[in-house]
Amino acid sequence: MGDNVLNLTHPLESRVKLLVTLSENEKLEYKLDYSPQALKTVSAFANYSGGKIVFGMSDDGKIIGIDDSHKLRLRIENAINDNLTPRPDYKLETLELEEVTIVELTVSPGSDPPYFYKGKAYKRSDTATTPVDPSELRNLIKENLDNPYDQMTVTEDDLSFKLLKEELRHSKGISQLSEDTLRTLNLIRDGKFTRAAEWLADRNNNLRCATHIVRFGRDISTFRDRRDFDSVSLIMQYKGALEMYEKWYGTYEEIEGFRRVARVLVPREAYREAVLNALIHRRLDMNSAVQIAMYDDRIEITSPGGLPPGISKADYLFGQVSNPRNPTLSLVFFTLNYIERFGTGIRRIRQAYQDFAEEAAFDISDHFIRLTLPVIDLNKPKQGEDLASHILRLLKEHGHLSRADLETMTGYGKSSVQNALNTLIDQAFIQRTGAARSTRYQLL
């Protein structure tokens, strides 16, 4: 895909030979050794479409080599980290050919331009690096606000989409994943893969593209199970999260009267929506993974990044405002019929708990969003349920119970439970059987 200059799929020797055939251009610069001037070019590459600086080569493309690649790489890394604001994404590699060593610096298009060096932002003009004028700087800032991170392009050009292809075949009957289809899904732009494509590829080189799931025992020092999904498709991460749910919180059966009734520990719909929200709407540029912590009494799902700009906490919890942080990922998951388009995920999570005593909890900060899904206790009163209705439901589920049983199950004291039982008897909803310690209550 794209310009050969940015092709990282060639073997190292072939890449060095390719560089010799290329002249400096807006995405490629040669330098014999490091100098602070290189940081201006790093700023320019990060502000626009990325590029490479190759150290150990003359301006006319001849390989001269460097003496100490480790020392040079450390110097470049420290210089970028100390002098560029904000810090851009980059990669350093050592390339060798016939005992000659060069260092290749690849700078990715930045997710948060403008990138400044000593208070100035730079751009490339053919082979020259020049400061960005005030008017263009304003445009650069505006374009950053208008251009979602997941629609920016990446340097990787060897991505495969077998899993995405299979999911599209099941959901839409699409048998071939052509370049036109990828372009329609916004996974290709200007002849390059976007960040959304990187996160949906079967494998990638992005360590941020990860979900870590742990099933704890009685405390956080005890691991009963663990699965890590690193640098694999978000679809694989989603499916793996569902597998862990089915293993530890799937439906179970309970005897109700003379019948077996299916029960749930955590509503599946709530878990599914919470995982999808975490994967699709997380901040892709944060160096952190989605974390799913499973306990005996709850599941905690933590997504990197706070709320998207323009969305308040009230909008998030109670509204149906759809302002996705990653619109391309949202489009793909909508196309696969995994999500609704109109921001109903949080409402569906809340609704999944409406028939139970427990409620989903939301912890929102500037750096993360954590959803806590409690394990259901069917003996507790449902939301808004009074004591008498609670007793009727428990008697329907269990057949007959003593007053002591009902006190334990409802959490109410002796007098409150007895008053409710007397009222239900007077209203001919239940009857008392037995006497003394053998007294039981059951529905009429």
Image (cartoon, helix red, strand yellow):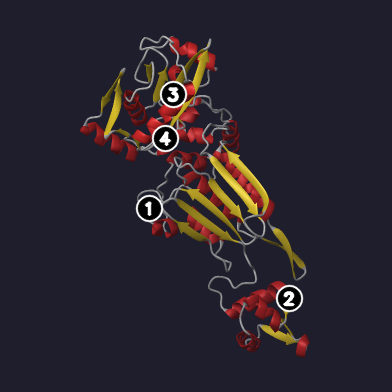
Identity of the amino acid at label 2? Gly
- Relative to 317, residue 234 above or below: above
Q: Where is residue 327? Give x, y as percent.
A: 43, 41
Observer-nearest residue: 261 or 210?
210
Give how far apart the Cα atoms at labels 2 and 1 are: 49 Å
- Label 1 sits on a secondary structure element that is loop
Alpha carbons under labels 2 and 3: distance apart: 78 Å
> Can I make out residue 258 in this image?
yes
Does label 1 or label 3 sit earlier along the sequence?
3
Toward which corner of the image does residue 389 lie, by quadrant?
Answer: bottom right
Task: Please name the amino acid that badge 4 sits on.
Answer: Gln
Numbered disc in front, either 2 or 4 = 4
Q: Nearer the viewer, mark 3 or mark 4?
A: 3
If you read the primary sequence from the N terminus, does the residue marked by circle 2 or circle 1 appear first? 1
SS type, badge 4: helix
Separation of marks 2 and 4 at Cα, in angstroms = 58 Å
Upstream in sequence: badge 2 or badge 3: 3
Mark nearer the N terminus (1 vs 4): 4
Three-letter amino acid code of the residue under disc 3: Leu
Neighbourhood count class around disc 1 (C-alpha, 10 Å): few under 14, some 14–19, many 20 upward: some
Q: Label 2 neighbourhood size at 10 Å, few (<14), some (14-19), many (20+)?
A: some
Which residue occupies the foreground of this view, 193 or 95? 95
**Mark 2, residue position:** 399
Query: What residue is pinned by disc 1?
Result: 311
Q: CA distance from mark 1 to mark 4?
A: 20 Å
- Left or right, 23 with respect to 409, comes to left
Image position of 150 with respect to 411: above or below: above
Q: What residue is at 42 percent from the left and 19 percent from the top?
A: 54
